[in-house]
Image (cartoon, rainbow, N blue to C red):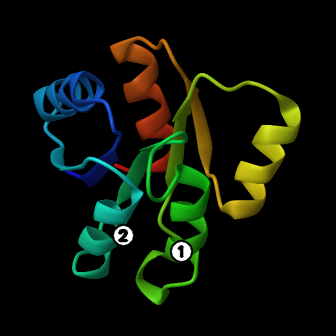
Amino acid sequence: MAKILVVDDSKPIRCMLSNVLTNRGFTVVEAADGKEAAELAAGSAFDVIITDVYMPEVNGIDLARLLRETPEHRFTPIVFLTTESREEFQSQGNDAGATAWLTKPFSPKSLIDVIRQVVPE
């Protein structure tokens, strides 16, 4: 099964994501912000990265830009998790390297559906 990096400054969101994904057999690594995620990603390969957009230190869009500059994550699917739905914002995210978007609040089913879209089984 896929190895997934979950990045969110909200511990309850990280826990919920982790629970849903591990119950489906995925391996999950958690990061509390974009800075920690960049450090974890530098030393490990992930099959998909799920990141919140609004975080302190390094936000999700900046994290995507950083990851896209590295050979090991140039093509790693990045799913943005956000409450933001404005088209201009999504355009910035897509330019930074977004593969998919998941809008908060979301259901466990929609999370798994998005993961299945971006990670081949």
Q: Is residue 104 left or right of residue 15?
A: right
- Say if 60 sits above or below 13 in the image: below
Label 2, on which residue? 38
Depth order, front residue of 54/14: 54
Q: Position of residue 42 (x, y in %)?
A: 30, 80
What label does residue 25 carry, if any? none
Q: Position of residue 93 (x, y in %)?
A: 71, 50
Residue type of the residue flagged with mark 1: Leu
Label 1, on which residue? 66
- Asked whether the residues under the numbered discs 2 and 1 touch, taking CB atoms below 8 Å apart as contact, a structural biologist would say yes
Q: In the figure, residue 40 lies in which quadrant?
A: bottom left
Answer with mark 2 or mark 1, whichever residue precedes in sequence: 2
Depth order, front residue of 120/28: 28
Which residue shows up at 48% across the image and 12% down it? 105
- Say if 8 sits above or below 37 in the image: above
Q: In the figure, residue 57 lies in which quadrant?
A: bottom left
The residues bearing labels 2 and 1 have C-alpha atoms spaced at a distance of 7 Å
Depth order, front residue of 12/57: 57
Which residue shows up at 40% across the image and 57% down it? 34
Q: Is residue 81 left or right of residue 30?
A: right
Q: Secondary structure at mark 1?
A: helix
Q: Position of residue 29 (x, y in %)?
A: 18, 52
